Amino acid sequence: MLESLTDRLGNALRSLRGQAKLTEENMTESLQEVRKALLAADVHFRVAREFIDRVAKQCEGQAVLKSVTPGQMIVKIIHDELVSLLGEGSTALEDKKPLRVLLLGLQGSGKTTFAGKLALHLRKNGYTPAVIACDVYRPAAIDQLETLARDNDILFYGERDSKNVRKIGRNGWEWAKEQGADAIIFDTAGRLQIDEPLVKEVVDLKKEVQPDESILVADAALGQEAVNVAKTFHEAVGLTGIALSKLDGDTRGGAALSMKAIAQVPIKFLGTGEKVTDLEVFHPDRLAGRILGMGDVVSLVEKAQDTIDEDEAKRMAEKMQRAEFNFEDFLSQMQAVKKMGSLGGLMKMMPGMGNVEVGDKEEKKLKHTEALIQSMTLQERQNPQLLNGSRRARISRGAGLPVKDLNALIKQFQQMKKMMRMMKGPKARKMMKKMQK
Ligand code: GDP
């Protein structure tokens, strides 16, 4: 699986890994090699170019870690960019019961096989699955699904005499409910190409059964063509995910790597063989790890990064205890958080706040806070008492936010300092002792 991509990337990075020093020259050369590896993997040229640009930018802005070589650092950067290219975020199916899943795909893509794989996967996760054959053109396709269902004890519904897809969908749905099914998989007809009648049929069926998930089964061996099919399907009928089939026979990986960027649909499953058990839930980080095959380097750099974060957190905690914490510290903390990806990450570093839930609203507030502090001069950040009326007006203008937001921030900050000061004194110690009793 994806062997040739792994080999090519490995070669491109091997020379870099050992370098004690990174020069513009050897870096440009290696990144060129990475780009070539991606293109050879049939990754869309735009995706490859943007990927290299992002990696180069990341390399510029990286903090130097003492315990790893720059080459190792780049491996980690490429790993993270691969994860983001494959599609960050959740790739799980909607978590609801009953769950309705519509399956789409061109003929031969592996759709029927996937219907069986998905049914078994859902059963393992506590559902009672049923498959509904919504193909009105090929009786053989209905037979294939029925056999697959019978062999695996899956509830099956089909109507061989009807040509009304909507009605079959509706009847199947009713029937499955009566049988106690709570995961209904609608298998639509596979066609040779996407055309108007196909789109109309799918849109009609979607209206009737209101699926929670619309998943396209795409054949990874088709490379860019699979991505084009997904893009067209998504634009025509709307998809919620991709099941990338036949990844076991794909050595290049172009479809997997370009899918999210070009088709704008997340991959949710990988088909890795002909058997009904050959299914993997898609995890971008796992696949990135497998493609790079350099898990040792990645975890080494992660560890080094963690240590830096820990050192920094400790230094901050000490400053807080001395009530010396100023806006400049606040800002550098926030930037550390951004590097880690979320406010939730910072909370985990703060003693006693590991369980605080952080949502979008808080993230937005954090962005505003950052903008306000960034509009301050260094002197103002270090000496908040300088912040008089005219300075406050200038800062809030600079951040594009109302003065009252800045006032609230300063007030909050002063309260925080007051608390820190209180925690320092003997009274606080007494109080803490009382609380512990
Ligand atoms: P459909 O026409 O889209 O319903 O496709 P089928 O489910 O009938 O699959 C077409 C062929 O691809 C069959 O020979 C399957 O055994 C094979 N197939 C399906 N999924 C996979 C997979 O993940 N890996 C491999 N190697 N073969 C697969």
Image (cartoon, helix red, strand yellow):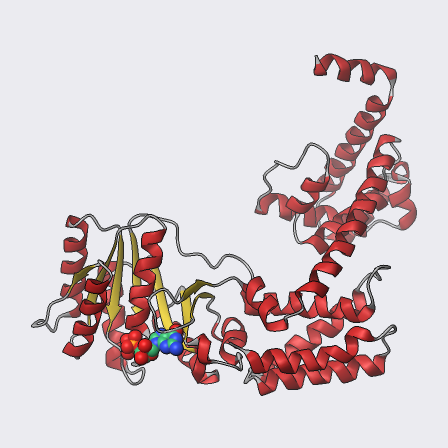
Name the residue rendered at 78%, 82% in the picture.
28
Q: Find residue 297 and report its horizontal and vertical position in percent.
A: 72, 65
Quadrant observed for ligand 1 in the rendered image: bottom left
Determine if residue 47 is in view: no
Assign the C terminus to one quadrant of the image: top right
220, above or below 423, in the image: below
Q: Quadrant of residue 63?
A: bottom right
| Nearer to the camera, 48 or 384 | 48
Q: Find residue 283 and report its horizontal and vertical position in percent.
A: 52, 62
Name the residue rendered at 56%, 79% in the picture.
3
Name the residue rendered at 16%, 59% in the picture.
172
416, above or below 314, in the image: above
| Apparent side of residue 215 relative to residue 35 in the rendered image (left or right) | left
Q: Find residue 198 and report its horizontal and vertical position in percent.
A: 26, 78
Q: Find residue 247 and report its horizontal and vertical position in percent.
A: 45, 75
Determine if residue 220 is in view: yes
| Apparent side of residue 3 relative to residue 250 in the rendered image (left or right) | right
128, above or below 151, in the image: above
Q: Quadrant of residue 43?
A: bottom right
